[in-house]
Structure formats: structure tokens, C-alpha cells
Amino acid sequence: MYPNLFSSVRVGGIVLKNRLTMAPTYLGYAGSGGTMSRLLLDHYRLMARSGVAMVVVENATIDHPIGGGSERTLRVDTDASLEGLKKLADAIKREGAVAGLQINHAGRFAGVAEPLAPSAVETFGRVPTPLTREAIADVTAKFAGAARRVKAAGFDMLELHGGTGYLLAQFLSPRTNRRQDEYGGPLENRQKFALEVVKAVRDAVGAFPVGYRFLADEWLPDGLQLTESRVFARALASAGMAYISVMGGTYESFFLPHIVEKSKSPGYMADLAAAIRKEVSVPVITAGRIASGELAERIIATGTADLVGLARVLWADPDWVRKVSEGREAEIVHCDPACGDACIQMVMKKKPAFCTRWPPQKVKEYKAKFE
């Protein structure tokens, strides 16, 4: 029914059975302290069973707690996390999906009293501590160590989280990077840290595929915008990224009234992906309320992107892929923008997220698994 959407594609040397991926989505399902939980395993098992070609697990911190977004951010900073991560990778692959894990340092958005960042730029009432050159080298090494664990755990790919305004993006942004050394100033310097991390990670894992979650536009007047992110995308492609997963916005722009309205539109980030795809030869992923097979097919058919990332669309209805492929789209349970982003509000309050469209019994079952 949708020949382009359900065609195969090669990413990082791995053949994906269709153009649909699960985009990494933090839901607060890990156990206390970022440990593996039954709820997290069951959640990703269900997502992999949905029929998407690849599942990218939500951000796992390379440095707990200073690099984690919350107490329930998954961990990949110590060998003690390997047993749980192996179970997670195995659960995804057993359901027929390629398994990826996103690794991250939250920087100034970390859930700690004194976060680290490129510069001392106030963030929601806190002023982070600027990273020294020695600390930058330490963080780079921790990204490499985390990457080795992703590979050792049996995942098929890893993804560096350079989106949502986290640490890699904070160095890129002229708004949050006001350094006067070799890591600040012109874009050539501001992209230095991210490219050093990319090199360290690729050196650590060899031919293992590494993708990049890519912030194309902060949607802030003094932030990173397409003029510079296009240049950075070319540098990433030259550095050997397996794919670039494009997004827009940060925690400081997501809740601005005009961005809230923008985010209600179908495929609201596809234009960013299209702009980046013109600059690179590696596969590009787009996401953002791509809720119909028709829209997803058009994105692939027109060359807007090479793959479609499903986040809340798939979470609200894990049968979305089958219903689209079988011509049963009228039966899809859609994410409801009128709910006021209830799932995000739950996460912001450090609670596990549940979809308002789920039947009460499903919510009850999820809550019963939550530690």
C-alpha cells in the first residue's frame, strides 16, 4: 500500500526491513538510580514487536548522576549496568527489530544541584559550572567508555544524543557556549567538542555503526540555527556517522506558545530534515507527529528524509505499523494533542508517563510494574 515506506534501506551496513524506526523517548520507566526495570524491558519488547525496523532506546547517561537528566535516567556509565543492558538488547532483537541505544550527557539540564556546561549561562534558575579542558577530556573519555558498553551489551548500533539542547548541542550553540578558548567563538571551535567525542567513540568501537541525534534549530533567536547546523551536519557525515536523526527545539523553546502551536502540526520537523538531507549523503531520519501512513509515505517518496521516527505515535498505539501496512488506519488510536502533553507533564514531575488514550486496564498494568 505504501511501497516506499515499506521498502528496505541500508544504514551503517545493516539492512533495515522498512523505513520506520522508534525514536528515543524518555518515559521515566527505568528503576531508581537508572537501573533496568521490568517495566522498561516490557515496554521496549512491545515497541520492537510493533513492526518498526529499528528501536533506539532512550538516552542512557555516560556519567551518573552529573550527566543524567533524572534519577530514572538509564545508565551506561559502569560495567555494573551491562547485565541489564544485555537483557534489553536481547529483548528488542528477539522481536525482530534492530537494537540501538542512545548515550548522553545532559550538561546544564542534568538533574543535579550543580550541573556542568560549556559556559556559566543561567538555566531555569541555576548557573552551571563551566567545564575545564581537563573535564572536557574526561567527558570525552566517558562517552568512549559508554560506547564500548553499548557494543558489549549486544546492541546493533549506538546513537550520540546531540539534540534537545543537551551537552553536545550546548557546545554548538552560540547561546550557551560563550567560551574564549579553542572550544568557543566561531562554529569551527564550537563544533570541536562534538567532533572529538565522535572520533573517540568511533575509535572505541571500530566499525560498529554510530548515529547522531541532531539539533538543527533551537527555535530561539540567539540559538543554533540552520545556517550553522548545515555546516556541522557535513562535518558529521565526513566523520563517518551511520545516520543523522534530525530534530528542532530545546527545553527552553518547547513550551513557548508559538512552538507549542507549531508542534501540533503533522510532520512539523520534516522541513529541518529536508534541509539537512540536502547537505549529506548518509541516511536522515525525521520525526514529529507523523501520524498517518500517507504522510510517512510522502516524506520518503519525496526525499524529505530516508527514514521516519515514531515516538508518541507508536507509544499511543503499538499496532500503528501493522494497521498502516494492512490498510486499517481508521482503527489507529492516535496521540491526542488536546491532552495538553500530559505525558510530558508527568515526566517533568518525575513520574512515569502513561498515555491518556490508553484503556484503564493498560494503565493499571503499567503502574503495577513500576517500582
Image: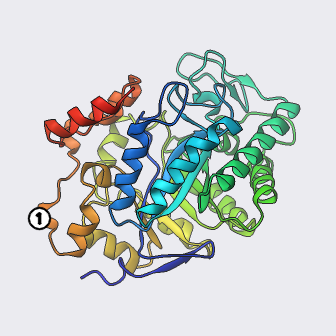
359 to the left or right of 315: left
Q: Tag count in the figure?
A: 1
For disc 1, the neighbor class at 10 Å (few under 14, some 14 to 19, many from 20) is few
Looking at the rendered structure, the secondary structure element under dot 1 is helix
Residue placed at 60% from the left, 54% from the top?
Answer: 159
Q: Is residue 282 above or below residue 79?
A: below
- Residue 168 in picture, x, y percent from top left: 67, 44
Tell me the kind of residue under disc 1.
Answer: Ala
Please say which color scheme the image uses: rainbow
For the C terminus, which image quadrant? top left
- Residue 176 in picture, x, y percent from top left: 65, 34
| Residue 310 seen in this snapshot | no
Q: Is residue 88 above or below residue 29?
A: below
Residue placed at 12% from the left, 62% from the top?
Answer: 331
- Residue 1 in picture, x, y percent from top left: 24, 82
Who is closer to the viewer here, 357 or 95?
Answer: 95
112 to the left or right of 263: right
Residue at the far left: name it: 330
- Residue 163 in picture, x, y percent from top left: 56, 47
Q: Quadrant of residue 107?
A: top right
355 to the left or right of 27: left
Q: Quadrant of residue 131?
A: top right
173 to the left or right of 309: right
Who is closer to the viewer here, 200 or 93?
Answer: 93
Q: Quadrant of residue 233?
A: bottom right
Residue at mark 1: 330
| Residue 82 seen in this snapshot | yes
Who is closer to the viewer here, 49 or 221?
Answer: 49
Q: Is residue 234 above or below residue 327?
A: above
